[in-house]
Image (cartoon, rainbow, N blue to C red):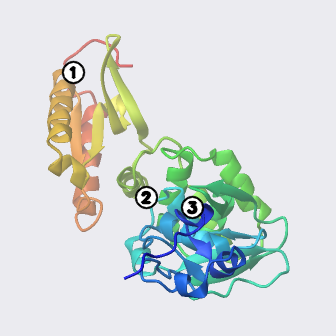
């Protein structure tokens, strides 16, 4: 068996177009060798792309300068939490900015946008729509609640942009599909959230008539920092912590959560632990419990201290 001819250096570690390889003098037979995979038509890659950013980098050589990854593809690349239903659809969304033809490659979904309506940036080595424009595009694919979660992530723990920048992007696109959902979501997006679970918990409380909780609140008593909690009603001394699967499976996180709970008890705060079930099938019982604690706490009936809370 003869050794395979080495590819030119520029083609060894990344996906490339077949026509570019032919231009560099690579024989057609070498491009059909089994050590190269074919993730998209006209593309060869040294490895099989699996993650969304890997697949985007594999398709990137087929993109023109006026094309960017967009919609849920761009959102996934920058870390926006998306519903699991999109994990089953591996197609990559690409927007053509301007009047040229949309992309037509199997495994992709082509979109078009007028020049000046979608801005281009780079993330993970591929061209994507600007995060604010990506959020606007999600209005055609997500529900209002899913948009709130995405928006909370963008202006919160991901830190891609401010709420003002997000609002401006929506206002620039007044006559697009999904604009009503986008406007409804904007009214409920809040900076400060650190997980989708926190967002779902906040929405569950507020939509059932409870006051807006403080997000990631530092509990300070007598000038001493006690804990930072996901959501809080400081006047009633009620703290709420969303418990994800990580908290149950990671020993360090579990121990830290227990310690935080004990420290809050020591300064006369209630700690309510919330799971996915509490903001799902058990949502009414969960909200009723918090409402009861707020009533008792605000009335001062469990307050045995004279110190002022921060």
Count up the numbered dots: 3
Q: Nearer the viewer, residue 230 or 67?
A: 67
Q: Residues within 10 Å of mark 1 (few under 14, many from 20)?
A: some
Residue 13: x %, y % from top left: 52, 62
Looking at the rendering, in which quadrant would you find the N terminus?
A: bottom left
Residue position for label 1: 267
Q: Vertically, is 145 above or below 113?
A: above
Of labels 2 and 3, earlier in sequence is 3
Q: Can residue 92 be seen at all in this image of the molecule?
A: yes
Q: What residue is pinned by disc 2?
A: 207
Residue 140 visible: no
Of circles 1 and 2, which is in front? 1
For image coordinates 65% across by 62% down, the residue present is 128
Q: Residue at x 15, y 28 (%)?
A: 262
Image location of residue 234, percent across then percent down? 36, 30
Instruction: Determine the image quadrant of residue 176.
Output: bottom right
Give residue 93's quadrant in the image.
bottom right
Residue situated in front as seen by the camera: 76 or 81: 76
Q: Is residue 197 left or right of residue 185?
A: left
Instruction: Label 1, secondary structure: give it.
Output: loop
The residue singled out by tag 3 in the image is 185
If you read the primary sequence from the N terminus, does the residue marked by circle 1 or circle 3 appear first?
3
Q: Which numbered disc, 1 or 2, marks the residue that appears first in the sequence?
A: 2
The quadrant in which the C terminus is found is: top left
Q: Nearer the viewer, mark 2 or mark 3?
A: 3
Spot occupied by residue 209 in the image (x, y as percentages of width and height): 41, 54
Q: Does 35 appear above or below 291?
A: below
Secondary structure at numbered mark 3? helix
Horizontally, residue 84 falls left or right of residue 269, namely: right
Q: Give the left or right position of residue 201, taking residue 26 as reference.
A: left
Give me the C-alpha separation between circle 1 and circle 2. 30 Å
Q: Is residue 298 above or below residue 242?
A: above
């Amino acid at each position: 068996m003869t050794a395979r001819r080495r590819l030119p250096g520029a083609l060894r570690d990344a996906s490339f177009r077949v026509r570019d390889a032919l231009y560099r003098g690579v024989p057609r037979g070498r491009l059909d060798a089994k050590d190269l995979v074919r993730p998209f038509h006209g593309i060869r890659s040294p490895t099989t792309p699996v993650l969304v950013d890997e697949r985007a980098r594999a398709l990137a050589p087929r993109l023109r300068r006026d094309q960017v990854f967009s919609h849920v593809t761009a959102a996934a690349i920058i870390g926006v939490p998306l519903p699991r239903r999109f994990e089953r659809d591996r197609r990559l969304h690409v927007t053509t900015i301007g009047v040229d033809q949309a992309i037509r490659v199997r495994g992709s979904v082509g979109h078009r946008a007028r020049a000046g309506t979608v801005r281009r940036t780079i993330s993970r080595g591929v061209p994507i729509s600007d995060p604010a424009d990506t959020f606007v595009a999600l209005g055609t694919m997500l529900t209002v609640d899913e948009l709130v979660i995405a928006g909370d992530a963008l202006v919160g723990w991901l830190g891609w942009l401010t709420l003002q920048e997000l609002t401006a992007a929506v206002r620039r696109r007044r006559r697009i599909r999904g604009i009503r959902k986008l406007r409804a979501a904007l009214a409920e997006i809040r900076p400060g959230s650190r997980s989708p679970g926190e967002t779902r918990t906040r929405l569950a409380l507020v939509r059932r008539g409870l006051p807006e909780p403080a997000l990631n609140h530092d509990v300070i008593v007598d000038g001493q920092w006690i804990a930072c909690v996901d959501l809080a009603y400081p006047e009633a001394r009620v703290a709420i912590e969303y418990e994800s699967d990580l908290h149950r499976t990671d020993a360090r996180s579990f121990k830290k959560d227990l310690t935080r709970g004990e420290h809050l008890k020591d300064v006369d705060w209630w700690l309510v632990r919330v799971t996915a079930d509490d903001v799902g099938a058990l949502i009414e019982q969960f909200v009723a419990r918090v409402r009861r604690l707020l009533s008792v706490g605000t009335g001062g009936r469990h307050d045995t201290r004279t110190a002022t809370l921060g």
